[in-house]
């Protein structure tokens, strides 16, 4: 049974930083992409950043480019999201996700496995 467990969320003031972690377990076949998505109640889920397990290629939403960095530690089955220069618009529940298939890398509909989420709140 695949499990994705996120941690690292919390409350921070605008301009601050947080680092999210996602530990994966239970895979029979390792995913090819892992990513971070976020959602605000009443709004559509947004793809934030994803990373290709093979070579570490990273993909970002325009809204976070230059501020967020996704990385992976394959030995620890862990994916990280370093979030810098946070602003109140980044406030959301952040979810870790994984997939083995294809499709648009920031499209949450192409991901098979999801964590429970970790809340990030940025105050002005």
Image (spheres, rainbow, N blue to C red):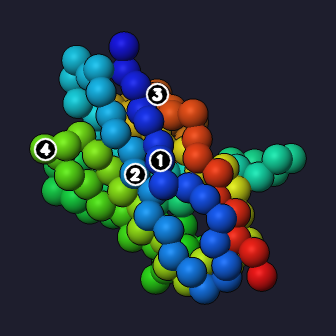
Seen at 29% across and 20% down, the residue is 26
Q: Is residue 50 visible?
A: no
Question: Residue 47 in the image: x percent, y percent?
Answer: 56, 54
Residue hosting label 1: 7
> Disc 3 and disc 2: Cα gap in Å?
19 Å
Seen at 37% across and 63% down, the residue is 70
> Disc 4 and disc 3: Cα gap in Å?
22 Å
Q: Horizontal placement of 88 versus 28: left or right?
A: right
Question: Residue 69 in the image: x percent, y percent?
Answer: 39, 70
Counting residues from the start of the chain, the first of labels 3 and 2 encountered is 2
Q: Secondary structure at mark 4?
A: helix
Number of the label disc, if any, that sits on residue 75: 4
Q: Horizontal placement of 45 versus 56: left or right?
A: right
- CB contact under 8 Å: marks 1 and 4: no
Q: Closer to us: mark 3 or mark 2?
A: 2
Q: Secondary structure at mark 1?
A: strand
Q: Closer to us: mark 1 or mark 3?
A: 1
Q: Horizontal placement of 112 versus 28: left or right?
A: right
The N terminus, quarter of image: top left
Counting residues from the start of the chain, the first of labels 1 and 4 encountered is 1
Q: Residues within 10 Å of mark 3 (few under 14, many from 20)?
A: few
Seen at 77% across and 82% down, the residue is 124
- CB contact under 8 Å: marks 3 and 2: no
Write down the quadrant of residue 122 in the picture. Answer: bottom right
Q: Residues within 10 Å of mark 4 (few under 14, many from 20)?
A: few
Counting residues from the start of the chain, the first of labels 4 and 2 encountered is 2
Q: Residues within 10 Å of mark 2 (few under 14, many from 20)?
A: many
In the image, farthest residue toward the left: 75
Counting residues from the start of the chain, the first of labels 4 and 3 encountered is 4
Picture layout, residue 110 above or below residue 92: above
Tally of numbered discs? 4
- CB contact under 8 Å: marks 1 and 2: yes
């Amino acid at each position: 049974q695949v499990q994705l467990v996120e941690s690292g969320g919390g409350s921070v003031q605008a301009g601050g930083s947080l680092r999210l972690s996602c530990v994966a377990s239970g895979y029979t076949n390792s995913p090819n992409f892992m990513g971070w998505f976020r959602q605000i109640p009443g709004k559509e889920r947004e793809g934030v950043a994803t990373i290709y397990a093979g070579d570490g290629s990273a993909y970002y939403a325009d809204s976070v480019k230059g501020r967020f960095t996704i990385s992976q530690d394959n030995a620890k089955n862990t994916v990280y999201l370093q979030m810098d220069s946070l602003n109140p618009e980044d406030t959301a529940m952040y979810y870790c996700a994984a997939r083995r298939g294809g499709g648009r890398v920031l499209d949450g509909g192409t991901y098979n496995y999801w964590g429970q989420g970790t809340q990030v709140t940025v105050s002005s």
